[in-house]
Amino acid sequence: MAKSWGDLVDGVKGGDLRSLARMITRVENRASGWKAAMKAIYPAAGRARVFGITGSPGAGKSTLTNKVALGLVEKGFRVGIIAVDPSSPFSGGALLGDRLRMGDIATKEGIFIRSMATRGALGGLCQGARDVSRILDAYGMDIVLIETVGVGQDEIEVVKAADLVMVICVPGQGDGIQALKAGIMEIADVFVVNKADREGADEVVADISMMLELSSEADGKKPPVMKTSALNGDGIECLVDTIIEMSEGKQRPEAQEEERIREEILLLLEREVALYVRKVWAHNGSLQAAVEQVLQGKSDPYTIAEEMISVIRDRSSGETRGKA
């Protein structure tokens, strides 16, 4: 018999692993009642520190996340991992290959791994990942690691969901040049040059350090630049210690926290409005009529969109006048 939302919420707060897994699945699938469940979870969250791990494809993010999570657990922390994979544009599904690469820690006590699809979200990070992070927080995880898809320079959405961001670079893939292009430079709280056993690692470190010197204020604190080799374990312990130190010592600036909350509210609102419009216009035939007008050459998508927005605006204005 399926558990009710109330039972799942209580189970998550009580540290029940099965309730955690089932609630995440239902929330990710947007099952009926998911919003009420998240409202109940929200007050219990807020203690865990959330680290975003991003960087170019092939930088070794999954292997590094694996080693970092293991190091954190060995130091007594409970770790949740959200591994975000790109969705298929056809089926909406994802390979979820990160689960395969993290197989050796998947059953480790103190670690919970959840693979998720981006579902077409801008920047590779969907609202669902935020929700799952909050559920893991309420469950009792100390640190949540969000390993993003890895679309390179433009992947900055993670900063809106994470307390701290780790940017992974590697030698031999042009990351030194990428560092010179700003891009994700501004979102990093720590830079990690992974695969440091390869030739060119020191040059990447030098490039990043130089850009930090040029872009930072004279008295401003610069993000650390660290070298690791996830494959042989070099530098992992030092990185883990840095993560612990940062998670215990850094709080979000008030302005940044306000912006994060504002963005999340707007994102949820945009999705709700879009779903409402789709449902109403598909039901009353307006959408199909608009499609036919475009197909017949009587109109175009831009005009249709403007007309539909005008209908919403006029209706909203009428309701406002009626209440006055």
Image (tube, rainbow, N blue to C red):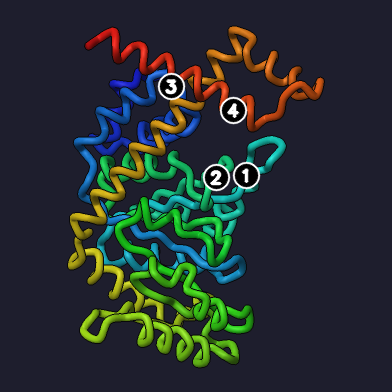
Mark 2 and mark 3: Cα distance apart in space: 31 Å
Q: Residues within 10 Å of mark 1 (few under 14, many from 20)?
A: many
Tell me the CA gap for discs 1 and 3: 34 Å
Question: How far apart, in angstroms, are the residues tagged by discs 4 and 1?
Answer: 27 Å
Residue to which mark 2 is pinned: 118
Q: Upstream in the sequence, badge 2 or badge 3? A: 2
Q: Residue 238 vs residue 173: left or right?
A: left
Are discs 1 and 3 less than 8 Å apart at CB?
no
Mark 2 vs mark 4: in front: 4
Q: As displayed, is residue 282 above or below residue 197?
A: above
CA–CA distance in space, label 1 to label 2: 6 Å
| Residue linked to disc 1 | 87
- Where residue 222 appears, as percent x and y from the top left, is 30, 80
Mark toward the start of the polypeptide (1 vs 3): 1
SS under mark 4: helix
Q: Is residue 281 left or right of residue 234?
A: right
